Amino acid sequence: MRIFAENDLSEHLDSLLADLRRTVQSENKNRLLNVNEAEHIEYLVSQYTLEPIKLHLDDVYVSDHEAMVPVGNRAFDYFLQPSDRIKRQVIKYHLPYSGETRMLYLTPNPRLVWTIDVEITGNDISFGIVNWNDDVAAIKREADRILENLSKQAQHSENNIRSYNAKLQQYIQEIVAKRKQEHLKQSNVIESLGVPFKKKQNVPETFAIPIKRQQPLIRKPSSSSEPYNPEPALDAETYRHILRICYDTGVEIERHPSIYVGKDEETLRDHFLMVLAPHFESVTGETFNKQGKTDILIRHEGTNVFVAECKFWRGQKAHYKTIDQLLSYLTWRDSKTAILYFIHNKQLTPVLENVKHVTQDHSCFIKHDKDVARGWYSYQFHLPKDETRGVQLAILCFHFPD
């Protein structure tokens, strides 16, 4: 094969995105609306992420064999025609690689106006150099030139693929959100007709599976084909605003030990509640309420839409108990939650690292979204008995040393 020269890499990447759009478009309406969106997006990302080619130049090795090779422009030296063949030693270079073999066939952008015939066997790229005159230096120069060009092409290919991978999650989020909005608008039209709606028979009840390109890292999320019922949810912007106020309030309290020294969880909770209430009551029509000793919550029709727990950090076991307690309060799809930790330890950094590590081992954990700021971590969870119902969990840590 002609390495990095069979087809265009950018066209291949475009075809993958087109296949991805078709996959989302073909998903069963109710399954798409009912599925845990964070898990579903993560699954699609794992299916369509590509592994770039890595050439292991430090592991190159050689073998040799004799072969009948065309004399070409050396015909005069052997009193032969250019198309004639002669038996010569062939030095065969073997270059190990890792990554998706298909990428070796595709031309990256930018590209070198150069290619070479190679053989792909297992995880080896091999090419031969004919020993014409027992000139070791010449053979080595030719091999080094070929290896350098292969390395440049592989780097261009890797850059193209990394750019594609970096944009993939945002792209999937957008097309999934758009498709869900299309379904919801269509449902509104049907409901507005005021006549019974009969579903087509023999509608596929499973997700379309993308062409398999690599071992999936994330299992396909479960969902339900039962009719989708819209549920109330705290909008994302309001959720971020709540968290920002809590974070800024906690950072300010950190600067004034007289506020937190000797105070219990309930008293510290009331400081946050006092700051939150005036910001949102007139805007959302919802009020922040207290339930139990440490909760801050927003309720809708008797059910919790947002719940926060204020706790002193007491280690992994208590951390899991707090998460379980939070999840037990929730029933709506796409619920929003937060844990506000007050940390008494003198050294803060080891505790923060511990929080980040153990959170991901919880049985309902889906993914770590991002670190918003020092001591502010964002996660996706699901409800214990219903994986289709996602929970956004923010953990905010404040240093209140004794």
Image (cartoon, helix red, strand yellow):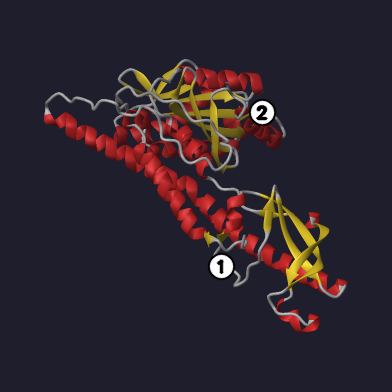
Q: Residue at the bottom extreme?
A: 76
Visible residue check, residue 173? yes
Visible residue check, residue 294? no
How many other residues sit within 10 Å of disc 2, few (<14), some (14-19) or many (≥20)?
some
Q: Residue at the left extreme?
A: 194
Q: With respect to residue 245, does 296 lie above or below?
A: above
Q: Quadrant of the C terminus?
A: top right
Residue at 11% from the left image edge and 27% from the top image edge: 194
Q: Which mark is residue 344?
A: 2
Residue 255 location, x and y as percent?
60, 39
The answer to which of 171 and 275 lies nearer the viewer is 171
Callout 1: SS: loop
Mark closest to the chain's N terminus, 2 or 1 = 1
Residue at 69% from the left image edge and 37% from the top image edge: 349
In which quarter of the view is residue 265 placed?
Answer: top right
Residue 170 location, x and y as percent?
45, 47
Q: Quadrant of the N terminus?
A: bottom right
Q: Which mark is residue 251?
A: none
The answer to which of 105 and 374 lies nearer the viewer is 105
Mark 2 or 1: the one toward you = 1
Q: With respect to residue 218, does 309 lie above or below?
A: above
Residue that label 1 marks? 110
Callout 2: SS: loop
- Give, as a three-letter code, the residue at label 1: Pro
Q: Residue at the top extreme?
A: 292
The answer to which of 341 and 21 lies nearer the viewer is 21
The answer to which of 353 and 120 lies nearer the viewer is 120
Residue 108 location, x and y as percent?
56, 62
Q: With respect to residue 305, does 14 lie above or below?
A: below
- Report, in whole angstroms, how far the alpha carbon at label 2 lies from the one at label 1: 55 Å
> Is residue 396 left or right of 176 when viewed as pictured?
right
